[in-house]
Amino acid sequence: MATGFRKAAIVALAAGGAAGLVGLAALAQQQAPTTTAGTAADAADETPIDDGVIVPRRSDAGPSGPLGSKEPGGPDWEQVRATIAAMKERDAEFDRQLRAMQLSGQVSEAERERLRPKGLRAAAPEQFQRVAVEQVKRTRVPLLAPLTADTVSSMRIVAGENAYTALGELPNGAAFELIGTRMRVVGGGPDFGKMRAAMRTRAKARIDAIDAPYVLSRHEQGVDLSFSKFNCAYMITIYCPDPSGDARCSEDGFVRSLADNLAILNETEGGTP
């Protein structure tokens, strides 16, 4: 993580249903975020969940009553395989169309990338210069990570069975972090149930590349983008030295671009339950 950043406490709790986008929250120290594409809910007092993923401290605006227990949910590996297979078919069709286009003229690399369909693809951990393969093998969560020119050279992964963190530096002192977990909320009081339902309703904006709704929120250190996929929960955070003056934190485009360029690094994990 870039020097000078005090890491925000983050929780990502996957809902029981495939559409669940619940309990996803991030609090920068001493300041609650404001949201633009939805409202991220605050959670319980800081308590370790699993392998370094922690629940943020309670906000005064948080739900009253018990939040319920937390237990690992089962990732939907069938959906993972179907998503990757569909993307391979789209890529094959794109390659056929590209060959036809090149018969009438050269297509530049920039144009190919602009036309290439967005979607989740499998990537080998070795494509990332600083990713340790043994860390990737530790987690049972579908390990999604942004595959871009910046992240290939800087990203590292710290993983446990039920959660992982992908993090690295960005140019000009910024940094990124992606947390994924298969921890899910079980039970909880009526107020918490209403909050979960409201979160699902608010998350109308979608990440087209992975066909998932998301919640966008800002805080004193940067911006968070939270979403659910494969019955797991994920949060991408961008940290900026000057969040209000750096477009990567003050605008939506950069964090959205990371979400649009996610790859899965452990595609075969679902074959060995």
Image: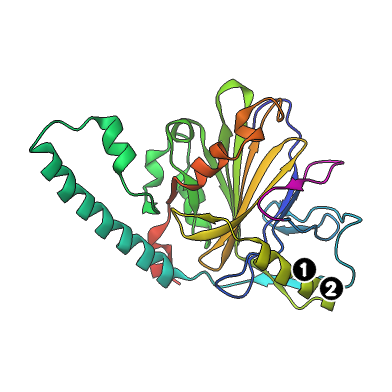
For the point 78% across and 42% down, which residue is it? Answer: 28
Q: Mark 2 falls on what kind of element? A: helix
For the point 80% across and 60% down, which residue is it? Answer: 43
Residue that mark 2 sits on: 191
**Magenta segment, which residues?**
27-38
Assess disc 2: are there few (<14), some (14-19) or many (≥20) residues with their C-alpha within 10 Å of its C-alpha. some
User: Three-letter amino acid code at disc 1?
Assistant: Met
The residue closer to the viewer here, 203 or 90, is 203
Q: Position of residue 121 (x, y in %)?
A: 36, 52
Is residue 35 one of those drawn in magenta?
Answer: yes
Q: Position of residue 87 (x, y in %)?
A: 32, 57
Residue that mark 1 sits on: 195
For the point 72% across and 63% down, which residue is it? Answer: 23
Q: Quadrant of the N terminus?
A: top right
* Residue 188 visible in the displayed image: yes
* Residue 272 visible in the displayed image: no
User: Three-letter amino acid code at disc 2?
Assistant: Asp
For the point 59% across and 21% down, which residue is it? Answer: 172
In the displayed structure image, the side of residue 267 where residue 178 appears, left or right:
right
The answer for how far apart the CA atoms under marks 1 and 2 are is 6 Å
Most common SS among magenta residues? loop
Discs 1, 2 touching: Cβ within 8 Å: yes
Residue 112 image label = none
Is residue 127 one of those drawn in magenta?
Answer: no
Its colouring scheme is: rainbow
Q: Position of residue 169 (x, y in %)?
A: 57, 30
